[in-house]
Image (spheres, coloured by chain):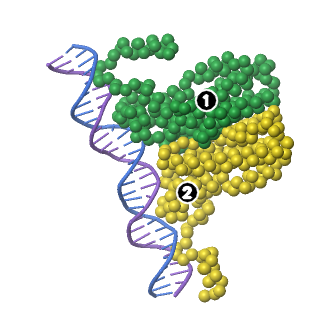
Chain colours: A green, B yellow, C purple, D blue
Amino acid sequence: MTLVSVTMKHAQTSRRKTGRPLSFDREEVLEKAMLAFWDSGYETTSISDLTAAMGVTAPSLYAAFGNKQELFLEAMRRYAGDHTALEQSMAEAPTARDAITEMLRGAAMLYTGETTPPGCLLASAAATGSPDALAVRDAVAAERRSVRDIILRRIAVDITKGLLPPDTQPETLADLAIAVTQGMSVLARDGADRERLLAVAEAASASWGNL
Amino acid sequence: MTLVSVTMKHAQTSRRKTGRPLSFDREEVLEKAMLAFWDSGYETTSISDLTAAMGVTAPSLYAAFGNKQELFLEAMRRYAGDHTALEQSMAEAPTARDAITEMLRGAAMLYTGETTPPGCLLASAAATGSPDALAVRDAVAAERRSVRDIILRRIAVDITKGLLPPDTQPETLADLAIAVTQGMSVLARDGADRERLLAVAEAASASWGNL
DNA sequence: TATATTTCGTATCGTTCACTATGAATTATT
DNA sequence: AATAATTCATAGTGAACGATACGAAATATA
């Protein structure tokens, strides 16, 4: 736990609210909602499914998170986490290729976790859907695009450094990296184990040799 | 009664049925259902959406296709087509690498068609869902696995021919090919145009150089 | 203790879901 | 023309959907 979060927690507990206290840990039930969406998707996970998974009644869910869409967006942000962390780890890698290889390995691990659903929430939860859920799909797409932009910038750094040939197409390589990660999610959903996904990550990384 | 009509009746191949004739072309409305599922997914496309897209009332839909699941499965089979066609075109390619490159190019074209929804039906329509739709997800997964098996066998051919090194991992390369195609579907959904997807296809193919 | 405030569980709300009962309409056969 | 067979459009079915109204319960403050 970071220093900031500790400070925040103390500040929160010191300023007590009047009225009946919450009977559940908000972060805890949000985590369970995230897992439910991760497993079953946005539109295809009902409020009934969510209340069952979270151990919270519907009125409590709405009081704490607003509505289904806001709950999903918050769960997605929790899943995607802080992108500065990804950006920093990629910046620390010696080369863009190493950075992307490491990202692919991380995806292989994440998509085959023993305590989490298979695949990637960003790939699975809102691949398609009704017009009503367009805003959610756009938000998920924006999250993917954000990751792509980080990859893009990291590749650009290596080009300016001369570590990659000047005719390198950073957009195409970033697209390919995103495609491989999202495709690995499909493989995980189809039952591919960690070993298979890691092998795919290595194979995709090997491709960079002649680019 | 002529001899011909008697023969046809007994052979169950009579062209004219008794009773009121169908007011729609079955293949035509199936195509429209396929496009609806392609665009909006299996569970997230309602019967009401389907009847509107197909121009057919609900009772007609059920009379012609059974139920929603059977309609989807038939639409998916229409989408995926006959796999012997894919197998043959891959067999005719000079190398497995050429075959897969051509498959990736074909996917790039298919996922960015001007008269069809973006992306791949197999990737988008049932990425996740409720327990009720498990059978549909399994069917879609089986379709993907079928394509993977075709790639797998094509690679194996080149290994036995000596066109690929004997330590080549056909499973990993097949997984990677599937991952790239399914990932390209996500890119298409996010707005990537044909040029970008074709560039990804070429970049993924280039990877084979050092494997 | 009395009051204000907030969350609790119960019991719904109106709408949409996948699906169908019913009888009129349309055809081939007799 | 009469009959049998099939599809048509209308109008629903019960169940599940996302979301809430409401009063009891639990806390802080006066």
Q: Which residue is mark 2?
A: B71
Residue B123 visible to an observer of this rendering: yes
Q: CA distance from mark 2 to mark 1?
A: 37 Å
Kind of residue at badge 1: Met
Where the C terminus of chain A falls, by quadrant?
top right
The answer to which quarter of the image holds residue A155 is: top right
Give me the residue at 52% from left, 31% from top.
Answer: A115
Residue B25 locus on image (x, y percent): 60, 65
- How packed is label 1: few (under 14 Cα within 10 Å), some, or many (20 or more)? some
Q: Relative to the observer, which residue lies in front, B130 or A7?
A: B130
Residue A109 disc label: 1
The answer to which quarter of the image holds residue A62 is: top left
Kind of residue at badge 2: Leu
SS at mark 1 in the image: helix
Relative to B72, residue B101 above or below: above
Give me the residue at 50% from left, 16% from top.
Answer: A1
Q: Chain of mark 1?
A: A
SS at mark 2 in the image: helix
Q: Relative to the observer, which residue lies in front, A119 or A10?
A: A119
Residue A77 locus on image (x, y percent): 52, 28
- How packed is label 2: few (under 14 Cα within 10 Å), some, or many (20 or more)? many
